[in-house]
Image (cartoon, rainbow, N blue to C red):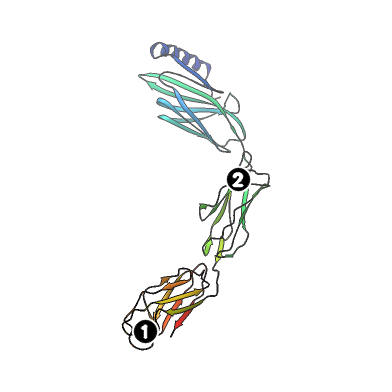
């Protein structure tokens, strides 16, 4: 038996009487079902219990350095203990291998002050709840999809009796607010702005009082492909014909006007400037006044966009 024998308790009472004369009065306080007791100056305070489904971490402070021991068991006879012999004022002991049910515990901290050994104790209880494991899976309404296409994601948590919420994430960022489960299922809002490529989609189940949390990931990710739209490109000149030394600009128009990306202009097969970003399907060059006398071929090359116009298209002005 790990509890202290009666003769030790008797000795403690004698010591306590001496301490009451020389060091102060017995401290006793009560909070709920727990009791704090000790002899000044050694006091246990700020007791906290952190639980998992099979362990309990008990932490507390003492107002002086002390070693510690936690007795615990399913009755107030305890029967088991964990010891920390370090002399510290901030204590933490973890009890593992617990089963479902209520456990009773007693903290005992012992310190020596000016040659006098003082003991403080704290008693309490906690309840371990064994949660049922869950599995979460994720599906897509359309996979692969094309850029601009609406997609929704659905999570399914089993067992279907699980309640709580699901938080969807896309590429590690929360997508929308947590969605409540209905018969073990939850669906995200639709999204049509995913860029071309592969995206990681997860669903994190919050758990409830009976079911453990779990996370599911969409297998292979959400694959978004280019939406290849046929385009035509035309080129016009601000002045054609022009005279030598006259400033000229060239404008390219890509149809449909929703196309995005850039235009590379070329004069006589040589790049003229850097690519120019389309605005409402149009792009205009800087002016040029150094073209020599004669005919020049002006070309606008639309290379498409990674999301919504992936087909190269060329317009020419002769």
The image quadrant where one finds the C terminus is bottom left
Q: Is residue 165 above or below residue 118?
A: below
Q: CA distance from mark 1 to mark 2?
A: 69 Å
Choose the circle earlier in sequence order: 1 or 2. 2
Q: Residue at x 62, y 49 (%)?
A: 135
Q: Is residue 232 above or below residue 164?
A: below
Closer to the camera in the image, 84 or 89: 89
For label 2, the crowd category at 10 Å Cα-Cα, with few meaning under 14, some 14 to 19 and many 20 or more, is: many
Closer to the camera in the image, 196 or 317: 317
Tell me: 134 left or right of 277: right
Q: Is residue 257 above or below residue 60?
A: below
Residue matched to label 1? 242
Tell me: 161 left or right of 92: right
The image quadrant where one finds the N terminus is top right
Q: Residue at x 43, y 81 (%)?
A: 299
Residue matched to label 2? 165
Residue 132: x and y, percent?
64, 42
Closer to the camera in the image, 116 or 50: 50
Query: In terms of secondary structure, where does tag 2 sit?
Result: strand
Q: Which residue is situated farthest in the bottom direction here?
A: 294
Q: Nearer the viewer, mark 1 or mark 2?
A: 1
Instruction: Using the rendered view, name the quadrant where residue 268 is placed.
Output: bottom left
Q: Is residue 282 above or below residue 58?
A: below
Residue 306: x and y, percent?
49, 68
**Which mark is on residue 128?**
none
Q: Are marks 1 and 2 in contact (CB under 8 Å)?
A: no
Instruction: Using the rendered view, name the quadrant where residue 62 is placed.
Output: top left
Query: In terms of secondary structure, where does tag 1 sit?
Result: loop
Q: Residue at x 38, y 77 (%)?
A: 249
């Amino acid at each position: 038996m790990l509890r202290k024998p009666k003769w030790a308790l008797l000795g403690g009472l004698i010591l306590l009487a001496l301490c009451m004369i020389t060091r102060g009065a017995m401290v006793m306080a009560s909070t709920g079902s727990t009791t704090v007791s000790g002899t000044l100056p050694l006091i246990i305070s700020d007791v906290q219990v952190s639980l998992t489904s099979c362990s309990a971490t008990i932490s507390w402070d003492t107002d002086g350095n002390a070693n510690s021991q936690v007795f615990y068991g399913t009755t107030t006879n305890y029967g088991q203990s964990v010891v920390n012999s370090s002399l510290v004022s901030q204590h933490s002991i973890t009890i593992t291998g617990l089963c479902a049910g209520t456990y009773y515990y007693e903290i005992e901290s012992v310190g020596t002050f000016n040659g006098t050994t003082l003991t403080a104790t704290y008693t309490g209880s906690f309840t371990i709840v064994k949660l049922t494991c869950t599995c979460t899976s994720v599906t897509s309404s359309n996979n692969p999809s094309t850029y601009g296409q609406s997609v929704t994601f659905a999570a399914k948590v089993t067992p279907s009796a699980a309640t709580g919420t699901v938080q969807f994430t896309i590429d590690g960022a929360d997508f929308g607010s947590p969605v409540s489960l209905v018969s073990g299922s939850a669906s995200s809002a639709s999204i049509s702005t995913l860029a071309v490529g592969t995206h990681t989609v997860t669903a994190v189940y919050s758990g409830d009082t009976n079911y453990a949390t779990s996370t599911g990931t969409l297998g292979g990710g959400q694959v978004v492909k280019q939406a290849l739209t046929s385009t035509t490109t035309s080129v016009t000149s601000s002045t054609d014909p022009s005279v030598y030394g006259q400033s000229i600009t060239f404008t390219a128009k890509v149809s449909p006007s929703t196309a995005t990306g850039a235009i590379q202009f070329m004069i006589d097969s040589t790049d003229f400037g850097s690519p120019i970003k389309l605005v409402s399907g149009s792009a205009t060059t800087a002016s040029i006044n150094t073209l020599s006398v004669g005919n020049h071929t002006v070309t606008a090359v639309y290379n498409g966009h990674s999301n919504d116009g992936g087909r190269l298209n060329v317009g020419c002005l002769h």
